[in-house]
């Protein structure tokens, strides 16, 4: 996969979460705007291959903020990170207006938890020559065959992305752990995540410290690391995580043992 001018292949890379929100479900991941550069530098030093900035919490029961609020939270941190570091930067948003702003500022990828369903989103990404992460989501909980639903949605939205001009090598897919799925469905998806590879696109796994692991967010690191190891075993290209150093170490151990 190509993000910015970087090629990602044949490994499992860490995408570092930088939450510019006051209400993300894992409070230790929340970053004040003035601390964003420090957070980015730490993530890079710990081995992150890409940074993912989010200015809207999408935790269960979240209170939506407007695109203008998202942009106000993103503006200074995004510009500072892009000017200080040579690393691909993704922006986590489902608002077309936010994507247009972020791409205009120089962001390299849009990580869209609504799978390019917002009007004009795919066009903005294509116009910027940027990458897209397309995530499965739905208005209500999935019923029936989970993998059939997820695969049909992702396949359709990937085709839509291509039709709007997004380059194939700049598309990756996310099964959407925890979105429109019960805990049992999220576990089923996680354990069979490699099946999504048959769609023909690289995959991103976003399971870090999520509720499918039980307990409190602060207690879910071990389970997150197990999911990262599973991702590496299934040739998932990216894992989107809160704890960069620990996940990088887990991936390195897996590949060392594989040799």
Image (cartoon, helix red, strand yellow):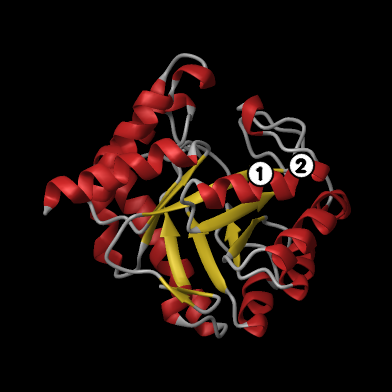
| Residue that appears at 27% across and 66% down | 10
Q: Residue 112, can we see it?
A: yes
Quadrant where the N terminus lies? bottom left
Q: Give the residue pinned by disc 1.
A: 39
Task: Give residue 151's quadrant in the image.
Answer: bottom left
Return the x and y of residue 106 as percentages of the image width and height. 71, 73
Return the x and y of residue 29 as percentages of the image width and height. 63, 33
| Residue that appears at 43% across and 29% down | 182
Between 9 and 138, the residue placed more toward the observer is 9
Rounded to the nearest angstrom, the CA distance separating label 1 from label 2 is: 6 Å
Assign a secondary structure to mark 1. helix
- Tell me: residue 161, above or below residue 245: below
Question: Which residue ends up furthest to the front in the rendered image?
Answer: 45
Assign a secondary structure to mark 2. helix
Between 106 and 112, the residue placed more toward the observer is 106
> Mark 2 and mark 1 in contact (Cβ < 8 Å)?
yes
Residue 35 is tagged as: 2
Return the x and y of residue 208 as percentages of the image width and height. 46, 36
């Amino acid at each position: 996969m190509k993000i910015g001018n970087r090629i990602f292949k044949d490994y499992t890379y860490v995408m570092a979460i930088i939450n510019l929100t006051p209400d993300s479900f894992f409070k230790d991941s929340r970053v004040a705007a003035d601390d964003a550069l420090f957070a980015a530098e730490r993530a890079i030093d710990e081995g992150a291959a890409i940074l993912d900035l989010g200015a809207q919490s999408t935790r269960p029961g979240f209170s939506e903020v407007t695109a203008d609020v998202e942009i106000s939270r993103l503006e200074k941190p995004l510009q500072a990170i892009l000017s200080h570091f040579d690393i691909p930067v993704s922006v986590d948003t489902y608002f077309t207006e936010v994507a247009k702003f972020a791409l205009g500022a120089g962001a390299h990828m849009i990580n869209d938890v609504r799978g390019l369903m917002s009007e004009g989103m795919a066009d903005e990404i294509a116009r910027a020559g940027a990458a897209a992460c397309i995530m499965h989501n739905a208005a209500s909980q999935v019923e029936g065959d989970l993998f059939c639903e997820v695969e049909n949605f992702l396949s359709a939205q990937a085709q839509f992305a291509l039709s709007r001009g997004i380059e194939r090598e700049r598309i990756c897919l996310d099964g959407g752990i925890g979105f429109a799925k019960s805990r049992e469905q999220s576990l089923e998806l996680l354990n069979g995540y490699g099946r999504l590879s048959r769609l023909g696109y690289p995959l991103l796994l976003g399971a870090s410290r999520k509720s499918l692991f039980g307990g409190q967010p602060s207690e879910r690191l071990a389970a997150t690391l197990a999911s990262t190891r599973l991702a590496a075993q299934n040739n998932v290209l990216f894992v989107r995580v809160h704890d960069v150093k620990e996940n990088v170490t887990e991936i390195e151990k897996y590949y060392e043992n594989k040799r």
